[in-house]
């Protein structure tokens, strides 16, 4: 079976986790701080605040930016549900923004057109690790606070810097499907000292310098997770490099009827997910089942979130997001994958499409 995804966990990760277990310091200790400093240095941000998940990172970012009832937040319609759900959980209204048909990210023009007098912030997504057009979006939104959902994008680069460097707060995820994993985990990145202090307070029961100053939850990362992440970080370049090699091989060998995601000029994707759009007349669910019968696990590419039950009754029309969600297929891609396996995926998918 060729799996859809598989974390690259080796002896270094096992030793790092075992050392934490032996130390007895399992939660919010020195290992978490080391991981934060390493990621901040990698992305070029002043502060990194480790949390329990990418979703928690989004929720805390919205809280710190004081998003609440009567506020609107711009959010791409093509996504995993976390960004839109985080906005809803903050009590705010989601202003969905459609995506561009080749890069599958929302454009500066789309954000500008969707903005209203009630818009409090914008969430910008680097879809599947593919960088958004950061400079254009920043210019279009001006002083409007931006939260970059870089959950999939560690190791990707805009044309002028690393993903994770856009906006007041950038959010990362370290889920096992991501390029770097801590099992579960996330992180907020910022250059604002006050924002960083508030994030640290909100992740830890509202505690600041020994006093509980606000009511807040527990969103801390464990030292076990941080140790795993630090070990993974040492070979991030190898992980991303291998993913790019495999993505290039897919581009060379996939059936010409398939559409693949384009990358903005001058940018580099980490290919957290390699997705294709199937030709008209092919149902993704049926194709996934046929691929699985032939020993290849594929996956749902993404969702048109405004069409999900959690947004029942939402009347927005987002034709491109709906088109990508309806025709998308995620292909296997992970660093340990052999070239022969990628070529086999291409061959089997081609047969399924033409049988």
Image (cartoon, rainbow, N blue to C red):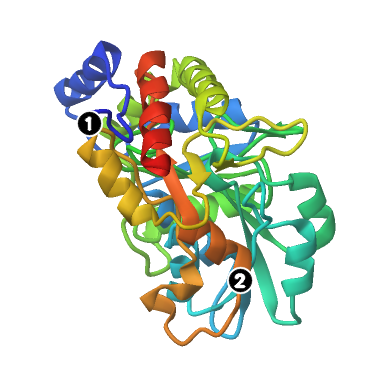
Residue at label 1?
25
Q: Quadrant of residue 32?
A: top left
Quadrant assignment for the C terminus: top left
Q: Quadrant of residue 285?
A: bottom left
Q: Residue 208 appears at what percent x and percent y?
A: 44, 55
> Eyeballing the image, is 10 above or below 326?
above
Q: Residue 230 appears at what percent x and percent y?
A: 39, 23
Nearest the camera: 149 or 354? Answer: 354
Q: Residue 98 appears at what percent x and percent y?
A: 64, 65
Q: Quadrant of residue 19?
A: top left
Residue at label 2?
318
Classify 10 Å Cα crowding around label 1: few (below 14), some (14-19), many (20 and above): some
Mark 2 vs mark 1: in front: 2
Nearest the camera: 249 or 226? Answer: 249
The answer to whether 163 appears left or right of 238 in the picture is right
Q: CA distance from mark 2 to mark 1?
A: 48 Å
The answer to whether 177 appears left or right of 237 in the picture is left
Residue 289 visible here: yes
Classify 10 Å Cα crowding around label 2: few (below 14), some (14-19), many (20 and above): some
> Eyeballing the image, is 204 above or below 341?
below
């Amino acid at each position: 079976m060729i799996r859809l995804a598989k974390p690259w966990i080796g002896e270094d990760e096992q030793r790092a986790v075992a050392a934490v277990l032996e130390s007895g310091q399992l939660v919010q200790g020195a290992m978490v701080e080391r991981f934060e400093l390493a990621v901040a240095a990698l992305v070029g941000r002043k502060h990194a605040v480790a949390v329990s998940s990418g979703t928690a990172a989004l929720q805390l970012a919205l809280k710190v930016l004081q998003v609440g009832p009567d506020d609107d937040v711009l959010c791409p319609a093509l996504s995993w549900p976390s960004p839109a759900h985080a906005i809803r959980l903050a009590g705010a209204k989601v202003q969905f923004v459609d995506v561009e048909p080749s890069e599958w990210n929302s454009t500066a023009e789309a954000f500008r057109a969707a903005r209203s007098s009630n818009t409090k912030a914008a969430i910008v997504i680097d879809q599947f690790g593919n960088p958004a057009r950061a400079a254009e979006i920043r210019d279009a939104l001006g002083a409007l606070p931006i939260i970059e959902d870089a959950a999939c994008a560690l190791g990707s680069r805009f044309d002028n810097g690393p993903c994770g460097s856009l906006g007041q707060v950038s959010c990362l995820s370290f889920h096992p499907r991501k390029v770097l994993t801590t099992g579960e985990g996330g992180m907020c990145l910022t250059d604002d000292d006050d924002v960083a202090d508030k994030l640290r307070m909100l992740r830890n029961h509202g505690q600041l310098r020994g006093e509980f100053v606000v009511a807040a939850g527990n969103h801390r990362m464990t030292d076990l997770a941080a140790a795993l992440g630090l070990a993974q970080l040492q070979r991030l370049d190898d992980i991303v490099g291998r993913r790019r090699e495999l993505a290039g091989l897919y581009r060379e060998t996939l059936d010409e009827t398939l559409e693949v995601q384009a990358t903005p000029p001058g940018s580099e994707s980490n290919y957290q997910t390699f997705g294709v759009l199937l030709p008209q007349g092919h149902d993704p669910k049926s194709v996934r089942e046929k691929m699985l019968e032939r020993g290849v696990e594929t996956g749902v590419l993404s969702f048109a979130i405004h069409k999900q039950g959690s947004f029942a009754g939402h009347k927005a029309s987002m034709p491109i997001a709906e088109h990508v969600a309806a025709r998308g297929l995620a292909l296997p891609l992970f660093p340990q994958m052999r070239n022969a396996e990628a070529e086999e995926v291409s061959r089997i998918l081609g047969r399924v499409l033409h049988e």
